[in-house]
Image: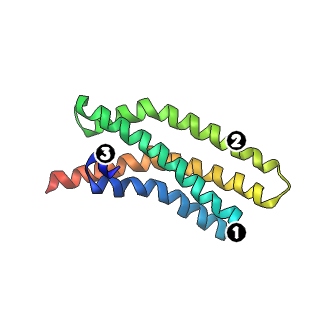
Amino acid sequence: MGILFKSVKIALISLIPNVLPLVFVAGLMGLIGIDLKFSTVVIFTIGFGIAVDDTIHLLVRYKIELPNARDKKDALYQSIKTTGKALIITSFVLSSGFLTFLLSDFSSTFYIGLLISITLLFALISDLFLLPILILAIDKNKETK
C-alpha cells in the first residue's frame, strides 16, 4: 500500500483496520478461555490475509476514484458505494463457509470456524467504517499544516 500510494502514512493507516480485528479476537479468546494452540493460531493468519484483501480492494478503488471526485470525501463515498457491496457479499459468503465448521464435534475445528467468522465480520466493519475515518483524519492533518 505504501508503494501504491507513495505514502508511508497510508501503509500504516491501512494496517489498523486489519490488526484491530485480530486484537479483538485475541481478547475474545482470552475472555472465553480458548488456549493458543497451532490450530487456533491459524485463525490469525487466515483472518489477516482476508482482511488485508478487503482493505486493498477498497483503497485501490479509492485511488481510482480520487482523480474524478470533487474531494476526498466524495472519492471515499464512491469507493464504498462501488466496492462496499462486494466486500459485504464476500465477507458473508466466507463467514458462512467457516460457520459450517460449527457443526464439528472437534473443538479446534469448531473454534476455528467461529473465530475466523467473527474476525472476518469485524474486519469488514473496520474497513467500511474505520478506514474512511482514518483516511479523512490524515487529510485533515495535511490541511492544517
**Count of picture labels:** 3
Q: Position of residue 34 (x, y in %)?
A: 71, 68
Q: In this image, 68 relative to 47: left or right? A: left
The amino acid type found where label 3 is placed reads: Leu
Quadrant in the picture for residue 43 = bottom right
Q: Position of residue 122 (x, y in %)?
A: 55, 51
Label 1: few (<14), some (14–19) or many (≥20) C-alpha neighbours in 10 Å: few
Identify the residue shown where x is 13% and y is 57%. Answer: 145
The amino acid type found where label 1 is placed reads: Lys
Identify the residue shown where x is 82% and y is 48%. Answer: 103
N-term mark: 3 or 2: 3
- Residue that badge 2 annotates: 97
Mark seen at residue 4: 3
N-term mark: 2 or 1: 1
Label 2: few (<14), some (14–19) or many (≥20) C-alpha neighbours in 10 Å: few
Identify the residue shown where x is 48% and y is 59%. Answer: 19
- Residue that badge 1 annotates: 37
Q: Nearer the viewer, mark 3 or mark 2?
A: 3
The structure's colour scheme is rainbow
Q: Is residue 14 above or below residue 76?
A: below
Q: Residue furthest right?
A: 105
Contact between labelled residues 2 and 3, with CB atoms less than 8 Å apart: no
N-term mark: 1 or 3: 3
The amino acid type found where label 2 is placed reads: Gly
Label 2 sits on a secondary structure element that is helix
Label 3 sits on a secondary structure element that is helix
